[in-house]
Amino acid sequence: MAGPTEPIRKRRRPALSCVECRRRKVKCDRNSPCGQCRAHKSTACTYAVAWATGPVRHESQRTQEPLLPEPADQGASEPQQPASSSPNPTIGESTGPGISLVLGGPVRCTPPDLDSTHTLPQKVSVSSSTIQAPPGPFHGILSKTRVFGHGHWMSSVPLVGSLPFSKDTPAERSAEQISEAIAVCKQLARDIKKQLPSRSPLPTNIQHLLPRRPVLDGLVQLYLDTFETCYRILHTTMFRAEYERYWSKPQTAATPFKVKLLLVMAIAAPLYGDVQTYNDLAAKARASVHVAQEWLSAPFEKDRLTLDGIQIHCLLLLARQVNRVGADLAWVSAGSFIRMAMQMGFHQDPSNLGETSALQRELRRRLWYTILELNVQAALDSGMAPMITAAEYNTQPPSNLDDDDLLEAYGETLPAKASSIPTQTSVLRLLADSLPLRLEATRIINNLQDKPPYDQVLRLGSELASVCRSARTFVDQLKPTEHDLSTHEARQFRYIFCEHFLSRFLLSLHYPYAIQSKRSPLYIYSQKVSLESALDLVSLLEDKLYHRLLLSGGGMFRDIVTRGAVVIFLELITQLEANTSIFSAQRNRVRREPLLEDARKVVQYTHDRLWYGETNVRGYLFARMAMARVEALLDGLPVQEAVIHATSQSLAVCRHILESLAASSLATSASPPDIASWTPGDMLAMPTLADTDFDCFSSENIDFDLSDPRFVQQWTDQCWSHHLFNPEEEEEPRQEPSLGEVNPGVRAEDEYAIS
């Protein structure tokens, strides 16, 4: 016999009247301010956010279909939401900048039947593919585009309505006169603010930074087919429409769109295959990054607290990494950016922020997880903490929907597609599924106080490896739909991008222990995992499109130089030094040939990066020195003499390349750069003599043991002399290779490979 069931609670209808009309129990016309408040001359006409109570499931508490390890065949649905009053699919209509989350001013969002002392949920342990718990009730204040806690003065605004002076107005002045006077003051305030520096327009010659229309069309399409399918920043359909309007009437284009277009061009420029236009595009891309940074860094950040501002921030951080403009300092900018997003409430699920359309909800979810991904990648590269935990946000991952689906569902709900169906958000959802785990891994990797127990490293490594395997399985099962018009090359790019961004955490976790494996057999497992991950990184060079990105990118696109090369050469040297005779080394050479091929690819890759604008020669110098040691051990030659000779040759090559690039840069510069407008990151990116000031002839200066944890530090500590550049000892540098010759199929017999 069935047990007693609880009575079904009826869903309480949302209160649509303003707070004052509900208190007076009179009919409200729902205007802002309403007619009743105008008649009573009340200035406190506010509307409370409707809260669902009882057993009715909240929209944000929809069942989240896990992507990993096994995709299911059911989609997530959202309950019916009131339709938007706007017939046009515009983003965030409001009287001010950004998305208007409330009507009629600030709204108290604490439901009356919940305890005001409600605390945030405790941090949950992260394992494998964890999705955070559904969001709880939101306690805060919404004002225009910002969210405030109870520490902000605006939290007391709803209480002002009970004070006498807020309702009483002088009898001799009518409400209309007051409204007119306020309108005049507001207009004067707007006129004053227009004169402030942050309201200044972009430079008038900004159109010179854009290439010709056919080239720009290709760059926009390239960005939308590659990066935009990984980081969901723009709504592709709306961006295309605005792009067409820009070409029809460039003078009327909004400033934020112009900045976004510049950054889209800058991000796609390194991937463009036309060799003749590469140098010009690279220069315009870096200039566009500077323009966007200057516009976004205006003194009055409040002007940038809009959806456009968030999108530009995302594009700028990505453009800096792709074009190697202050890429090593991206974590500093990411910290300010994530605080900006939290101030705007992106860390709260949109379903908690009042009535918004399905389009707005999904855009905010996509942007928040893009911000988190940019932040965790920058934190990993900078060696710092990610500044946020999974317990500090409750925004749900974006739904498995295409951009056109959101336009069709504007103002209403739409069930998400099954995870097995590829959409424009599939890659971002795949990354979001493992985000809590990678946040925890980054915090452990970059912990500056305590060294984690090795068993904890093994546990995290096992979970990260499981995520990588499941992601590969998931990607292999995805098949392009009839709506996916991108090329096979572009589709392959997005999946390689996803695999790269997952596997690099596994390498970083085991890397410190892999370096110590030669001295401590306890860490042999870490050495094997690191080697496998490093070889996976080198295999990325086989993809033509991704190879271009790895040549020009910095920060998170420099893993082969910063970690992969050390692991590969350490493995080779360890194997060769373990041989007891020359005969055993030569006998095993065939077995090591695949690993030697990967090592030669690394040498050629670090050389090619110099031609693509890399000003730090240490990566190429290290690869040449390490390869010289490997070759000497294979052939039974003196190691130190071989390394010194290779160093002398490679420095001559570096000098030749840098001189060629410097001359080319001076020849193409029409006017000297405006140093006053440069950021500190730009100054640090400038080449200096310190990059080529080396002295490695003294065995007391350099320890050639790659297993020594201090090995990498020597590249910074040692000061190497200029007598390496003695013309009597130099090889004649080869001519500059055509950029078209740089290809994934590099072999040992290529130009600068060491025999």
Image (tube, rainbow, N blue to C red):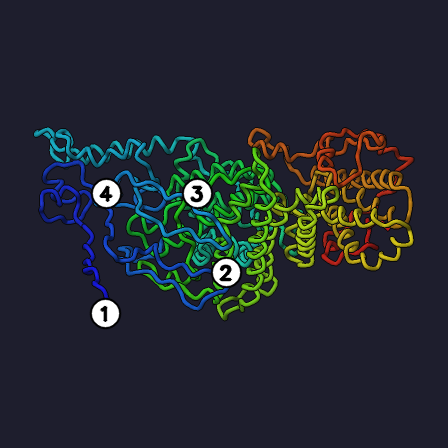
Pick the front one: 687 or 493: 493
Disc 1: which residue = 1
Disc 4: which residue = 104
Residue at point 16%, 44% (across, down) = 34
For the residues labelled 1 and 3, say whether their Cβ atoms are less than 8 Å apart: no
Residue at point 47%, 36% (across, down) = 336
Crowding near pointer 4: few (<14 within 10 Å), some, many (20+)? some
Q: Position of residue 364 (x, y in %)?
A: 40, 50
Q: What kind of residue is marked 1?
A: Met
Q: What kind of residue is marked 2?
A: Leu
Q: Position of residue 329 (x, y in %)?
A: 57, 37
Give the CA separation, mark 2 to mark 3.
Answer: 33 Å
Number of the label disc, if any, that sits on residue 275: none
The reply, left or right, for residue 203 in relation to residue 410 is right
Give the CA separation, mark 4 to mark 2.
Answer: 43 Å
Disc 3: which residue = 309
